[in-house]
Image (cartoon, rainbow, N blue to C red):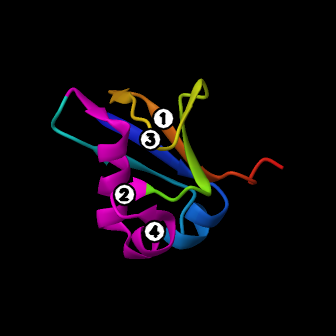
Amino acid sequence: MKIKIEYFGIPRQRVGIASEIYEFEQEEMGIQDVIRAVAQKHPAFEKHCMDGNTINRHLTVNLNGNQFFQTEDGTARDGDALLILSMDAGG
């Protein structure tokens, strides 16, 4: 499956790009697992945007413009888009 990840605010500063495509062998995957894959690829993201295995409490993840996730988990599927943003990025 392919998932588009878009970064805003602090996450964009830490990864150094606006967006990228991730490819996974699974047909669906937990959002927290996708975030951990981002952290593995981008050490600065892991250092500044993660609290252990979960995203920092000052950040949030949006799935397809519909739902926000922080500590709870959702499911990402092929073609989905995740936005990782600072809580104050819109504001």
The residue wearing badge 4 is 45
The residue wearing badge 2 is 38
Magenta stretch, main secondary structure, is helix
Q: CA distance from mark 3 to mark 2?
A: 11 Å
Contact? badges 2 and 4 (CB < 8 Å) = yes
Of pointers 1 and 2, the one earlier in the residue sequence: 2
Q: Which residues are magenta?
A: 27-54
The residue wearing badge 1 is 81
Q: Is residue 59 left or right of residue 3?
A: right
Residue type indicated by callout 4:
Phe
Residue at (37%, 38%) from the top-left corner? 31
Q: Is residue 52 above or below residue 8?
A: below
Q: Is residue 36 left or right of residue 15?
A: left
Residue type indicated by callout 2:
Val
Label 4, secondary structure: give it: helix
Q: CA distance from mark 3 to mark 4?
A: 17 Å
